[in-house]
Image (spheres, rainbow, N blue to C red):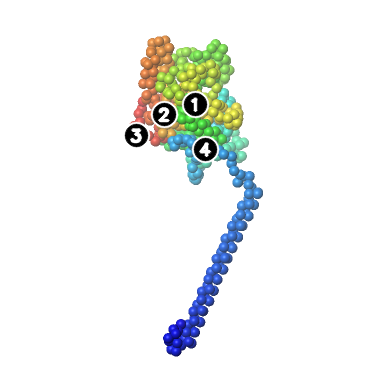
Amino acid sequence: MCKAEDFERCDYRSEGKMGFKFLGRVKKLKSSILKTNAWLFIIRAIVTALVWASAVQLVGIWLIRGPSLFKVCPPCPQLELPAHAELAKLPIPISLPPKRVYKNNGYLMVSCNGGLNQMRAAICDMVAIARYLNVTLIVPELDKNSFWAASEFQDIFDVDHFIASLRDEVRILKELPPRVRKRAVYSLPPISWSNISYYFHQILPLVQKYKVVHLNKTDARLANNGLPLEVQKLRCRVNFHALRFTSQIEEIGRKLVRILREKGPFLALHLRYEMDMLAFSGCSHGCNNDEEEELTRMRYANPLWKIKDINSEMKRLEGLCPLTPEETALVLVALGIDHNVQIYIAAGEIYGGNRRMESLKSAFPNLVRKETLLEPSDLRLFPNHSSQRAALDYLVSLESDIFIPTYDGNMAKVVEGHRRFLGFKKTVLLDRKLLIGSIEQFSSGSLSWDEFSSIVKEAHADRMGSPKKRVSIADKPKEEDYFYSNPHECLQLLDEPLRST
């Protein structure tokens, strides 16, 4: 603009041109701003439309499938187990292993016999055998004729997980394919404690000839030792990874452990003093005359139990009987177990009931059972299924701070091995022969309490489930260490070197 003093010298035309140029720029700037605002408005409109469209879709899904997708679950109990508790860990989703491709030599059907843990070990053996023979395994049939009246496989184990987790080793089917169902099935009991060469030379030719072979006995049909390392590791893989209990059993098992953990450490006592065990073993120490007669009648009535005439007292002194509840109370006190610790009775109904449990209850008042910890509605999930309830005891026994079996039956052995696999968790392996001899001396007054307690503690200082090698006895498989109680080929050893004692 022109100043007043330079009025005459100002060229108003040039100034006018500059003004018009400035106004033109302002108009262009306004036009650009308007265009930008318009684009912002359009973008906002599109985003708003998308949000509304999504909302409409969600409402539609809510109305159609709300009960299944969006229903809020009732509050579930949160499990607060210690960091070492394997049971509380949720399964990590993993991709399925690739299927192993092999020429199928035929089909192997198996019928397991015995209680839950005898059948568990047998299933592991049968998977290893099927893998080695390159056959297709049909999901094992569980024993329904024994005292334990087992359930179907899928009532106890997660059958789909079992099949899928082993697909890179062996093909497993839930049933025979239709095209082979009409074929004649060759059935036989394999020889006990056999090595792999027996199955290769004796069983495989039968499979190739008949295409379908049925093994009608499976207890202890594979040797403890002298097998290829890959066979031993496969037995472990089946036992510790593929044989997962059903979600229902796992859920109730976690609930039991949570309830116990809320009150502190706990000891799982596998008090094997049920009626079936006493009748089968012929052990009746502490029973009255009526009970002894009842147990004898039961043993003679069962055709599967071959030995009928048994000297109970002689067997007891040899350490071949389960400890009685009264003997167990003495041993636990002598070992120095805290009187206030929770003791979970991992067993069925104790023969003789409360009368036989008085000594144990007096010494350890915090005795609990699944029946006292769970709601009746939880137990109703397993009506008349002793194997399913035994599975609950198995899970609690795995998670306990200390596990003590009073008899070395199948559950005691399999749980011992599984606890070794979980990091050599403390498992007190009772020397029953020594204990019975010491109890007799204490009862007769030959030993004072301090002497008795000292003997018990010293004898078991090195029997706590620590790392060691299995004892192998040539040609005496029943006397050597059971593979599933100490599968040392599969264990992550601690710094301590393996011992053979």
Q: Secondary structure at mark 2?
A: loop
Tell me if residue 343 comes above or below residue 124 in the rendering: above
Task: Tell me which label, 1 or 4, sits earlier in the chain.
Answer: 4
Residue at 51 percent of width and 20 percent of height: 273
* Residue 275 sits in quarter: top right
Residue at 59 percent of width and 63 percent of height: 45
**Residue matched to label 3:** 495
**Residue matched to label 2:** 426
Which mark's residue is nearer the viewer, 4 or 3?
Answer: 4
x then y, percent, for residue 405? 46, 24
Q: Secondary structure at mark 3?
A: loop
Amino acid type, residue under disc 1 in the picture: Tyr
Residue at 55 percent of width and 11 percent of height: 289
Of all residues shown, which one is farthest toward the front? 5
Does the image show residue 101? no
Task: Say whether marks 1 and 4 touch (CB < 8 Å).
Answer: no
Which mark's residue is nearer the viewer, 4 or 2?
Answer: 4
Amino acid type, residue under disc 4 in the picture: Gln
Task: Tell me which label, 4 or 3, sits earlier in the chain.
Answer: 4
**Residue matched to label 1:** 344
Residue at 53 percent of width and 16 percent of height: 355
Task: Tell me which label, 1 or 3, sits earlier in the chain.
Answer: 1
**Residue matched to label 4:** 78
For marks 3 and 2, give the CA distance. 17 Å
For marks 4 and 2, give the CA distance. 26 Å
Task: Tell me which label, 1 or 2, sits earlier in the chain.
Answer: 1
Q: Secondary structure at mark 1?
A: strand
Given residues 171 and 208, the one toward you in this image is: 171
Task: Tell me which label, 3 or 2, sits earlier in the chain.
Answer: 2
Amino acid type, residue under disc 3 in the picture: Asp
